[in-house]
Amino acid sequence: MKENYLGIDVSSYSYKNLMTHVVEDINEDKQSFIVAINPEKILTAQQDNNLMRLLNQATYQIPDGVGILIASRIKKGNIRERVTGIDMLEALCEMASVNGKSIFLYGAKPGVADQAKFNLIKKFPSLKVAGVLDGYEKDQELIKNTINMAQPDILFVALGSPTQEYWIVDNMEDLNVNIFQGVGGSFDVLSGRTKRAPKFFQKIGLEWFYRLMKEPYRIKRQLKLPLFLLKVWKTK
């Protein structure tokens, strides 16, 4: 179940459906790759064919951004729910804790993933965290060996986008992992280093506005939203 916006596929699954598919993928020993899609990534991919191929190569492209919901309405699509990267991470952790699956946290600055691990276990006491590794380790063989020795079912990679997605695609075949997700700055939020927008802003789809108030320099990025919607409307 996918919709296409300016050449980029976006999955229209709800959280519940995504979790069902992810559990099936793990139980059937399949490898799946989850990537978060927002208007900015789609516009960037218009000028970068490698990025477009990368995003479309993912198994599940989650609609991370209110702009995708608006675009779906413009094209009379079925996407009615934002599936943000960090919420997907937490949903996967909850699923893992219930189903006895394990996770691995790779990326961010030294100490950040460790604190994220502590807070995730605090929220999901039965969660199995197979391992943690910061994003400053440069030895790629050591990274892959560390992950494989831990034998996680799910690997969260926080190296920034699209670096993390390219890393996943380049290394999937060498890793004994079923589910891969690039999670950007999620470890910073989970560790408490970065504050996420209050639930009210998240619920009404204005998380971007809260971040803009906190970080006015993001205005150039936010101006891409109307450009994206105009392009989608023209292809309606």
Image: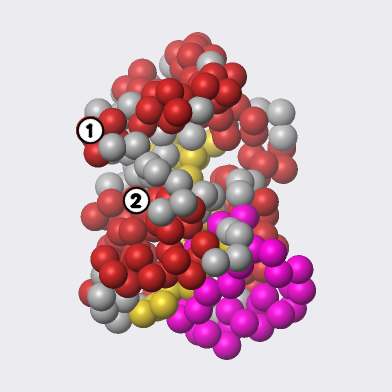
Q: Where's residue 92, x and y in %?
A: 34, 63
Label ID, residue 116: none
Which of 54 and 215 lies nearest the eye of the viewer?
215
Q: Check the image and report above or below for 40 versus 190.
A: above
N-terminal label among 1 and 2? 2
Mark-to-mark CA distance, 1 and 2 = 15 Å
The C terminus sits in image quarter: top left
The residue indicated by pointer 2 is 87
Q: Name the residue rendered at 66%, 77% in the picture.
A: 144
Which of 39 and 110 lies nearest the eye of the viewer?
110
Q: Check the image and report above or below for 175 versus 217.
A: below
Q: Name the residue rendered at 40%, 39% in the picture.
A: 63
The segment highlighted magenta reads 130-159
Residue 11 visible within the image: no
Residue 216 visible within the image: yes
The residue indicated by pointer 1 is 200
Q: Name the residue rendered at 33%, 27% in the picture.
A: 206
Q: Secondary structure at mark 1?
A: helix
Query: Colour scheme in the image?
Result: secondary structure
The quadrant holding residue 190 is bottom left
The amino acid type found where label 2 is placed reads: Asp
Q: Where's residue 152, x and y in %?
A: 47, 79
